[in-house]
Image (cartoon, coloured by chain):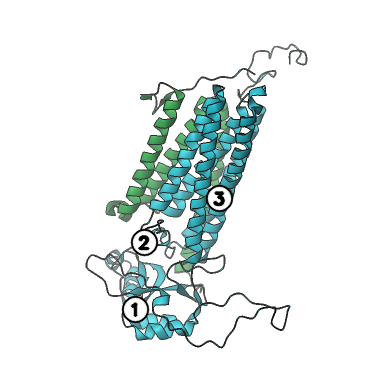
Chain colours: A green, B cyan
Amino acid sequence: MEHDNTHKLAIFRGTLKFKSNTQKIWGVLIFLSLITIVEVGFGIVKPAFLTENHFIGMKLLNWLFIILTLVKAYYIAWDFMHLRDEKSSLRRAVVWTGIFLVAYLLFILLQEGTYIEGIKTNGYVKWNF
Amino acid sequence: MKATVSNTDTEGKVWGGGNQPLKASYGKLMMWFFLLSDALTFSGFLAAYGFSRFKFIDSWPIADEVYNHFPFFHGDHPMYFVALMTFILIASSVTMVLAVDAGHHMNKAKVTFYMFLTIIGGAIFLGSQAWEWTNFIQGSYGALETKGGQILQFVDTHMEEGDEKMHRVSVEDFATASHKERVRHESKEGLWFTSEAALPTYSVQDVITGFNTKENLAVRTQELMPNVADLKTSENPADVAKAARYESLYMNADKTGQKGVLTRAGSEKALKDAVVYVKGANLVHNEYGNRLFGDFFFFITGFHGFHVFSGVIFNIIIFFNVILGTYDRRKNNYEMVEKVGLYWHFVDLVWVFVFTFFYLV
């Protein structure tokens, strides 16, 4: 079987181009480490304006963590698992299937969790004996 | 293939048959199938964790107070250790990609070297996780549990300059060990068909007696303090009443986001409900707070750790195959390294999410 050894070597929508695949791998490692350091930094400092303000029932800080996590997940899947080099049909079959099912599951469970919490706090139900 | 496909006008079309529409081999596609289903399993776990957390949103343990150990350092160091673990796993992912890349260039020596590094990285990660589990299971301060499963921890109400919150006190430091009549019943003594679990180190009475002799102690509950100042200025009378209740019950009602510390009188009253002394965590008891927290921790990091473990085993098999030259002789060359690599990166991917939802959020 002939092997296709060509890689797409640009990240950040083409703004950062690498000379070789090996170089790109190290570049992505540096980027992922930077994100982790930023996450840990925010986790230790916990700036007040991020913990006091909420968006759809969650602290802004938590939204920031989740977005940074998704960014990390993107680069792991695209460059380490080389989805970037696969055909777009394979990429979509994998990614969208997961995203839709997980989004659905999360919506149902988190909605339900919030509802039960409301019953516990506001309803006439004794739960702590 | 030519002989089996009849000539129709679908020839040359992507999905017309006789070619690879996704430009990926059977093995790689099957690996993607598996990874997708495995991703859904992990999502199920994490979504269930989210469900329980939203259900107990005002009493969930604070991760920074649970995972605050670092090897060879005493004191409070939240986050650094898991950040290090994340870095180790990402680094071992990098050596894996480098191995795959070397495989594409048919460079046997380099594949061997990078596979070796990947295995070492995986082993270090597993060791770190074992260490994390050990700390979690052994616990550090100990607490009392009430009949309803609420955890009562102990803090020193005397605060030093610059302290943000009251420090926790280890039960061992104040509990008075009493003379014990009650001995753990083992099956070898008498009734061979009955035995019981290990008895707790202290009886509830030991802890309460010790507590009564130290005036500076107070009980810390699982309750997280809401923004009481905001509640007070609210126009809803129910909110104002809630704020008044928080202020009468807790000493630190003004500290939003901290666990509520009961007044001395309230502490003594709360201790009357205690039934057992707990230290550390297992699937039934958990000194850190809500028991579900411990259960999810064991299940999710355990399931992930099991994936890392099997990943290391796969890597070792592939490593020896590489040394034996198996992939030099194969028709698809080093594709096996790539397939195992996909699994290994997936394990890294899952950890990134576990890291966020257990330690950060």
Q: Chain for mark 2? A: B
**Quick check: B159 left or right of A66?**
left
From the viewer's perspective, is the residue at label 3 or at label 2 nearer?
2
- Compared to residue B72, the image places residue B316 above or below, namely above
Q: Give amino acid for label 1.
A: Leu
The location of residue B42, given as percent across then percent down, is 56, 48
- Compared to residue B226, the image places residue B14 above or below, namely above
Q: Chain for mark 1? A: B
Q: Which residue is mark 2?
A: B74
Q: Which residue is mark 3?
A: B305
Q: Could you say which quadrant of the image residue B182 lies in? A: bottom right
Q: Could you say which quadrant of the image residue A48 lies in? A: bottom left
Mark 1–mark 2 contact, CB under 8 Å?
no
**Quick check: A23 left or right of B299?**
left
Q: Which residue is mark 1?
A: B217
Mark 1–mark 3 contact, CB under 8 Å?
no
Q: Give amino acid for label 2.
A: His
**Quick check: B160 left or right of A81?**
left
Q: Are callouts 1 and 3 both on one chain?
A: yes
* C-alpha span from label 3 to label 2: 26 Å
